[in-house]
Amino acid sequence: MELKAKGSTSIKALLVEDIGVCRLVLSTFLLRLHCEVTLAMNGKEAVDLFLEGKKFDIVLFDKDMPVMTGPEAIVKIRAMGETDVKMVGVSADDHAMEAFMSVGADLFVPKPMRMEALGPIIQEVINKKKNDMV
Amino acid sequence: MGHLDEQFRQVEDLQDEASPNFVEEVVVVFFKDSGRLISNLEQALEKYPRDFNRWDAYMQQLKGSCSSIGASRMKNECMSFRDNCGQRSVEGCMGSLQKLKREHAILRQKLESYFQLLRQVGPAGAATRPAM
């Protein structure tokens, strides 16, 4: 499912989260930051999107999801050669940081993610994209 | 301690003219999710006795859900349940779950009253949120 804010930047965000309320809140944060948001309900759906050739600038993963976890999905997506995509682990689990960083996530943010935390992350992605275009 | 923490204010800040009922929508989704997760956990407690890893995994999901809307008391009970899983205490887990269900019911009641009040006073009333 794709969501688009008015006046969206070209930042394409994929949110991988199985819990409805978490998905709703985080996707709304991303839309407010003018991202184009695609939703996936688990790690396998995220992997399938990449296999279909979809491109994203940033992917936010919950850790524990049915079918495929966030860290498992990161392993598979990185193995496809997707090394430029910013991968962010998001979890309320105190031990999740190690699980994410050890498989190649760029960043871990504990839940609940706040707008003050997400804003600078998106800005960094925007800046990197501008620099890559120059 | 109140039932809702700063995260609820973050959710409220997302409400605007384009999404005038956003907070209520989030709350509806939260209670749908949390009701399902609690039910799944109760089934797991019965079907998988002393499977603390499994019970902990279910509670971890509920904790994430609670933290997304700032349901702080519920989140604390989730953490208490997980501590009891770590200590392999069935009695402790059952006690935490009962407290969690009680907080769940209290929060639902308070939020229903809150939205009812908002509907009565209109948009101006939203400027001064009653303490919860």
Image (cartoon, rainbow, N blue to C red):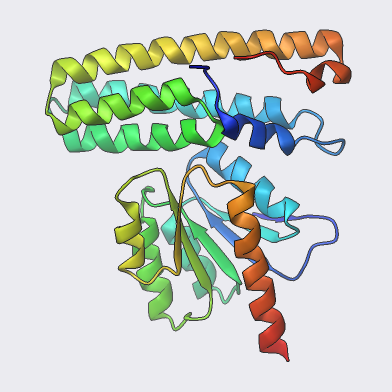
Residue B109 rendering spot, x and y as whole percentages: 57, 8
Q: Residue furthest bottom?
A: A134
Q: Quadrant of residue B100?
A: top left
Give the left or right position of residue B117, taking residue A122 as reference. Answer: right
Which of the pair B109/B35 is nearer the observer? Answer: B109
Question: Which residue appears at 72% of the width and 14% of the height?
Answer: B115
Q: Is residue B40 visible?
A: no
User: Is residue A107 in view from this perspective?
Assistant: yes
Rendered residue at 60%/63% (across/down)? A121
Task: From this view, report whether residue B36 is shown above or below residue A74.
Answer: above
| Left/right of residue B11 with respect to residue A68 in the rendered view | right
Q: Is residue A33 left or right of residue A46?
A: right
How far across and down, in percent of the image, does residue A89 sit? 44, 58
Quarter of the picture containing the C terminus of chain A is bottom right
Q: Is residue A36 left or right of residue A58?
A: right
Q: Is residue B91 above or below residue A71?
A: above
Q: How far from the left and from the top, in percent, is residue B7?
A: 58, 34
How many labels were placed on the picture?
A: 0
Q: Which residue is rendered at x = 82% and y = 30% of the image?
A: B20
The answer to whether A133 is drawn above or below residue B63 in the figure is: below
From the top left corner, tell me how far across and down residue A43 is, in percent.
42, 58
Q: Residue at x 28, y 25 (%)?
A: B80
Q: Is residue B128 above or below residue A134?
A: above
